[in-house]
Amino acid sequence: MLDLIALGEPLVQFNAVTEGPLRYVTYFEKHSAGSEANVCVAVSRLGLRSGLITRLGSDEFGLFIYEWLRGQGVDVSRVKFDPERPTGIYFVQRSYPIPGVSTVLYYRRGSAASAMTPSDLDEDYIASSRVFHTTSITMAISDSARETVIRGVEMANRHNVMVSFDVNIRRLLWPSLEEAVKAVEGVLRMVNVLFLDENEAELLFGTREPRVVFKEAEGRFGISRVVLKMGLRGSMAKWDGEVVEAKAFQVPVKDPIGAGDAYAGVFLASVLKGHPPSRSILRASAAAAMVVMVRGDEENLPRETDLETFLRNYGLSDVELR
Ligand code: KDG
């Protein structure tokens, strides 16, 4: 039995060691990344069992990601290798032109993961998990990957596995925002937990006002667990009728990419570990802050003791350190 299974494309991230435009960057650092893979690692770091459904290229980068994820304790038994297509990669430009903001340059078209099809889904495997997690990134990379997301979510629904969906609209991957919204709306009726930011709330519900977002998500799509991220203003969630919020921790930012995945992974893991929503949202917010302090999405994902030590530093730990 697994706690969380995710479906999506892991990527090798080449993160600029120096800030500024990529054309002048000489050194890049290699990291394992990709939204759903990040969530798997976040869950595994907190001592729960996660697994990833995906395809990798039979190349050095595919092996790097495979071995890294396995080393992080993520179940890779459903990772397939494609001898024809490469592993997707991307580059990160940091703090240019906007300080503290990163931009990405993808090389993932025609990647191994984009050739995923519903045949990659093992229904018994999905049924064996407590949560099935995916994002609209996977819906954007190809028609067959989108179909795979829909079938995976349907399978999870059939077995009462909680479906978690992080909207995660990546403008670069969609022909238009209208298409992105249409695709996302197509799965929302089958979603149990929704993560989104304010821009995505505006696109989907025409508002950034948290209580209206919660009402719309429930009224239009029947989703009673909604988590809204509001950047530096913190985050709010409505979880089965209870509204909770957390501040955003102010930390020195090296690269904000990966914060949302740390947030979602730690929120879900915390709920699965029995924390109340009020505590889960605080832990998620802390994990997001920890991740942005370094380059790379996964290295700073916290273990329990580090998460509590971070919170203790703000006077917010409720765990006795031995
Ligand atoms: O959420 C972080 C991801 O954006 C990053 O690791 C790459 O999955 C990725 C994507 O598609 O943008």
Image: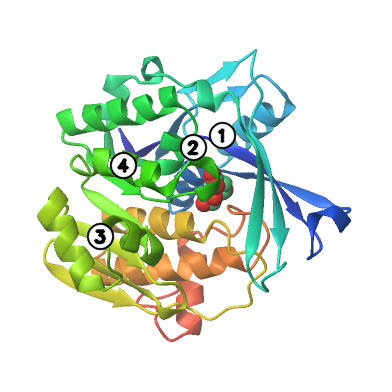
Q: Earlier in the sequence, mark 1 or mark 3?
A: 1
- Residue designated by label 2: 74
Give the number of the disc on residue 234: none
Helix, strand or loop at disc 3? helix
The amino acid pointed to by label 4 is Lys
Is ligand 1 less than 8 Å from the beta carbon at label 3? no
- The answer to whether mark 3 and mark 2 are in CB contact below 8 A is no
The amino acid pointed to by label 1 is Arg
Q: How far apart are marks 3 and 2 (CA)?
A: 35 Å
Give the number of the disc on residue 182: 4
Q: Distance between the residues labelled 1 and 3?
A: 39 Å
- What residue is at 52 percent from the left and 41 percent from the top? 173
User: Which is nearer the eye, 265 or 119?
Assistant: 119
Helix, strand or loop at disc 4? helix
- Residue designated by label 3: 205
- Residue designated by label 1: 70
Where does residue 159 sit, x and y in percent of width and height? 17, 30
Give the total of numbered labels: 4
Q: Earlier in the sequence, mark 4 or mark 1?
A: 1
**Residue 111 occupies which quadrant of the picture?**
top right
Q: Distance between the residues labelled 3 and 4?
A: 12 Å
Q: Distance between the residues labelled 2 and 1?
A: 5 Å
User: Which is nearer the eye, 214 or 7?
Assistant: 214
Where does residue 244 sit, x and y in percent of width and height? 24, 74
- What residue is at 49 percent from the left and 65 percent from the top? 288
| Quadrant housing the N terminus | top left
- Which is more foreground, mark 4 or mark 1? 4
Mark 1: few/some/many CA within 10 Å (<14, 14-19, 20+) = some
Mark 4: few/some/many CA within 10 Å (<14, 14-19, 20+) = few
